[in-house]
Image (cartoon, rainbow, N blue to C red):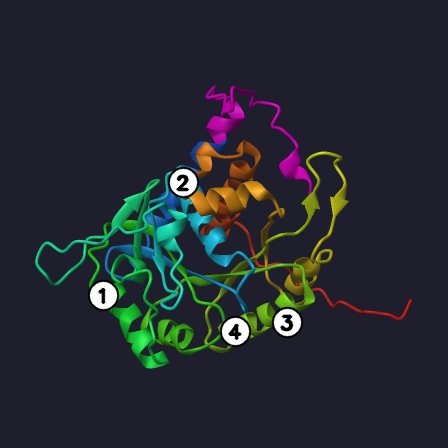
């Protein structure tokens, strides 16, 4: 759990910037990632010029799903993956804020199709680029689903290796629409260790199983808090709840993220990972590498573990 605290023996940090010296291990890792990306590009596109579509979901709001999706998109792009991010939360779009694009609007070359925006190497589309951010989208479920399908179909997507779709929380119309209308490669579920979040994350897992969308993995966000002053470790939202849930449902754990103010500051300010905390950047990139392993078949699904809770 504390690997994110350990500085790499081959990376030195000076004036806030990581060393750019390529060690043999680093070169080997880069070659490995390049082979995984090549494997993605050999597949038939799932949708238009998009090789792989991944849903990033949660059972409830407030667990950091959108922040995780944005940072994961930036981490994948930093590895050389041609990455896109679609904001599917029609009622509460987060991408404009997460990428410091508030007030920006998409353009159209022919008044029919839309050109997506790009920031930090990620191709972006969101309902937030089309509507006034001060206005509420008071739409019924079918209207919201239709709006999302229009965003997908009427956007001039470039060639992408991975399109991440930041889903709205819950298990409603939009989730069902995407599972029925799109050839989704798999889903990533974000949760916290808190019992309330785990109960809803379990419903999200059950929904994806029901609609036969493979679970690529689970990300446990806000796993713990480490006091920057005293070093005291505090399990604010409980301990290892996400790990237990993953074992119960035979889902791979892509990674655990700390509860840390730096993540919130980067999200609010739309700052790229490379400009933030080096250790957090490494942590998100490790999660993205694990996701690439799952997509390429190098990391198999974990063996189901029967968890027995006793009174002891």
- Could you say where residue 180 lies in the image, as x and y percent from the top left? 36, 76
Q: Is residue 294 in sight in this rendering?
A: yes
**Residue 299 shown left or right of residue 122 in the figure:** right
Q: Residues within 10 Å of mark 2 (few under 14, many from 20)?
A: few
Disc 1 to disc 4: CB gap under 8 Å: no
- Could you say where residue 270 lies in the image, as x and y percent from the top left? 41, 44
Q: Nearer the viewer, residue 63 or 241?
A: 63
In this rendering, the answer to whether 139 lies above or below 85 is below
Question: Which residue is disc 2 drawn over?
Answer: 35
Q: Which residues are magenta?
A: 1-28
Q: Earlier in the sequence, mark 3 or mark 1?
A: 1
Question: Which residue is disc 1 drawn over?
Answer: 153
Q: Earlier in the sequence, mark 1 or mark 2?
A: 2
Q: Earlier in the sequence, mark 3 or mark 4?
A: 3
From the image, state whether disc 1 or disc 4 is nearer to you: 1
Which quarter of the picture shows residue 85?
A: bottom left
Location of the N terminus by quadrant is top right
């Amino acid at each position: 759990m504390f690997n994110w605290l350990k500085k790499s023996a081959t990376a030195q940090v000076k004036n806030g910037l990581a060393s750019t010296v390529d060690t043999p291990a680093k070169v080997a890792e880069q070659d490995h990632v390049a082979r995984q990306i090549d494997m993605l590009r050999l597949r038939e596109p799932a949708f238009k010029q998009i090789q792989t579509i991944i849903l990033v979901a949660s059972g409830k709001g407030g667990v950091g799903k959108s922040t995780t999706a944005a940072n994961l998109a930036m981490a994948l792009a930093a590895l050389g993956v041609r990455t896109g991010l679609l904001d599917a939360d029609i009622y509460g779009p987060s991408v404009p804020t997460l990428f410091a694009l508030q007030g920006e609007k998409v353009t159209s070359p022919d008044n029919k199709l839309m050109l997506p925006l790009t920031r930090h190497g990620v191709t972006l589309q969101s309902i937030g680029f089309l509507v006034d951010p001060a206005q509420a989208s008071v739409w019924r479920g079918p209207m919201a689903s239709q709006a999302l399908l229009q965003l997908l179909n009427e956007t001039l997507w470039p060639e992408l290796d991975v399109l991440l779709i930041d889903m709205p929380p819950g298990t409603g119309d939009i989730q069902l629409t995407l599972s029925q209308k799109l050839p989704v490669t798999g889903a990533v579920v974000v949760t916290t260790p808190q019992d309330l979040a785990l109960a809803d994350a379990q419903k999200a897992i059950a929904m994806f199983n029901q609609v036969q969308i493979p679970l690529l993995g689970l990300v446990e966000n806000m796993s713990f808090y480490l006091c920057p002053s005293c070093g005291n470790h505090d399990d604010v939202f409980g301990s290892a709840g996400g790990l237990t849930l993953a074992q119960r449902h035979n889902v791979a754990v892509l990674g655990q993220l700390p509860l840390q103010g730096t993540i919130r500051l980067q999200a609010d300010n739309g700052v790229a990972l490379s400009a933030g905390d080096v250790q957090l950047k490494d942590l998100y990139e490790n999660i993205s590498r694990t996701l690439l392993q799952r997509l390429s078949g190098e990391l198999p699904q974990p063996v189901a573990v029967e968890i027995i809770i006793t009174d002891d």
